Image (cartoon, rainbow, N blue to C red):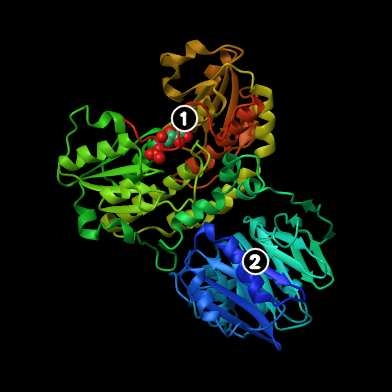
Amino acid sequence: MCGIVGYLGSKQVVPLLLDGLKRLEYRGYDSAGVVVRQNGDLRTVRAEGKLEKLVQKLEGKIPPGTYGLGHTRWATHGEPSERNAHPMIDSKGRVAIIHNGIIENFLPLKRRLQDEGWSFSSETDTEVAANLISSYLEEDLRAAVTRAAGELEGMYALAVVSTVGDPEIVVTRQGPPLVVGFGDGEQFLASDPAALIAHTKDVVFLENRDVARLTAEGIEIWDETGERVERPVTRLNWDPIQVEKGGYKHFMLKEIHEQPLAVQETFAGRVDFENQRVLLDDLNLDPDQARAVSKIDILACGTSWHAGLVGKFLIQGLAGIPVEVDYGSEFRYRDPIVTPTDIALGISQSGETADTLSALEAAGERGARLFSICNVPGSQIVRMTDGVIYTHAGPEIGVASTKAFTTQLVALYLLALYLRQTRKGGIEPELLQALAHLPAAVDEVLQLEPQLERLARDYSRANDFLYLGRGLNYPIALEGALKLKEISYIHAEGYPAGEMKHGPIALIDEDLPIVAIATGERVYEKVRSNMQEAKARDGIVIALTDREPAEFEGIAREVIQVPRVSEELQPIINVIPLQMLAYHVGVKRGADVDQPRNLAKSVTVE
Ligand code: F6R
């Protein structure tokens, strides 16, 4: 994951930047760099690989200076290389910028800037932002950053220094976090407070679209309307565990909130947005082999199995390949029919789940080639399969899977697109644009948390819950129910909405909350009818929808309105409120949400 640090004060900046970057090392990255303003010029030093490489490069020639920026990069646009590493300098050498996130409209902006005579030396979206800011720079860096940010679509946390004016750093964010810290005559900034607490405890977490200016005198902040604002200062009296939890009360909550970046990192470096291609190098499935695949057997357990069910829709829909999905624990006991042109795809966060591994083994014995989707490098599943798509979700500590699930869905989407590209001759740009927009939509859906906390308070005493969905949202209903069971110990059922009338309808009374997922077009009307059936039996209907709440008047007692994304990616958006609901119900009931009773993070017994 990308990391951002910055300092402005009277000390030598580069050692401070390196120290901050070191504290962000756990996030993983593929290149790093620093920039310092020196005698009116911007000096950058960048290196591909670990921070150690940058340190070696700086040995004996640390550029002097008392303010600058540091960055660790996880490639999104353009391969990991020194050329694509941050900080990026614009083609007139006037601003240096570091960036977290993804700029969705980078291509039209790039074309426009090229027409205006700006040149580009990297494939990054960051360089587009650098040139754009420079194109607006006269005297006032803040004005240039504000104007440029107004044209950027997507998610970004940006920090900028320039060659003009007195020492200053200007930052802004939309989505990814940015925190600024106050010292005595010195100011700090970082993407994660973990990088700051050795130096200052007084910090401000910037709001979306805030623009802040760090100078020797202090930090000034403007909100999205351009008004000067005072944001509350938070005092970070964190113990080491709180540092690890990033200030969140539980790992599960932290991991839920990491999803905008986590989903981005799953597709980072794997999509060539300019040439509309998906690149899955670690998969080891060349185009000829991909064309020869006759069936895919997805094997997984628990939440990963739910991801597999969504994967079936994606792969069949986008690539036209038949898919079967089995529980790892069931597959080998049903005499499955597997041929040598089949592939078996194991999905496992941990890569160590015994049932999934045994099922893969059984598929391998029957002649299938084996592949995996996994979050843990070097785990057993990776070692036993021919190729892998890593989810790059970062460590998941909470026992209940959250970001591992949504990143598995992104990995499956990438796989489906890769298969479409090889078998159908190409990928439509809108399918990739939908992916570029996903992190921003995930960020948006997280803003629903206060509503979900309120729902959790109102319904935490229920004895049962029913979750309904159809099509791609049926696995999401299953996942919503599983999360609630695990975290709050409330009994919950996930059901295909159309099946309700064949049995579960008998459960409905005035005490039963029924969470019904009604998004998209295909089965929307059907699910709405199912909700009406539930309402007619006095059930408490909670609609999760991408439509206006007014459409559910007289049917739903509560409406959770989520942002609309493409049909294929909508399950990723829909599951997040259900994760938050389960989390807050668990907390209200006093459960140990990070380590629910009887559960383990990796289940290595059959
Ligand atoms: C649920 C959960 C489990 C796991 C299952 C498989 O929140 O975490 O259901 O999904 O045990 O684990 P992995 O994905 O590690 O194979």
Residue beneath label 1, please? 599
Q: How many marks?
A: 2
Q: Quadrant of residue 355?
A: top left
Where is ligand 1, by quadrant? Answer: top left
Residue in the picture at 70% in, 55% down? 208
Going from the N terminus, do you reach mark 2 or mark 1 first?
2
Is 522 in front, or is 40?
Answer: 40
**Residue 553 image point, x, y percent:** 65, 26
Looking at mark 1, is its residue's CB closer than 8 Å to ligand 1? Answer: yes
Say which mark, if any, is on residue 169.
none
The residue sitting at 67% across, 72% down in the picture is: 160
Instruction: Tell me if 68 is positioned left or right of 420 in this view.
Output: right
* Residue 248: image location, x then y, percent: 65, 44
Q: Residue at x 51, y 12 (%)?
A: 507
Q: Could you tell me residue 360's position as x and y percent?
A: 25, 40
Element under label 1?
A: loop
* Quarter of the image that includes the C terminus: top left
Residue drawn where x is 60% and y is 75% of the image: 34
Up the image or down, 579 lies above or below 293; here it is above
358 is higher (above) or lower (below) than 463: below
The residue beneath circle 2 is 5
Q: Position of residue 335 (x, y in %)?
A: 17, 29
Name which residue type carries label 2: Val
Please indicate, yes or no, whether residue 94 appears anywhere in the rendered image.
Answer: yes
Q: Are marks 2 and 1 in contact (CB under 8 Å)?
A: no
Q: Vertical placement of 227 versus 113: above or below?
A: above
Q: Is residue 306 visible?
A: no
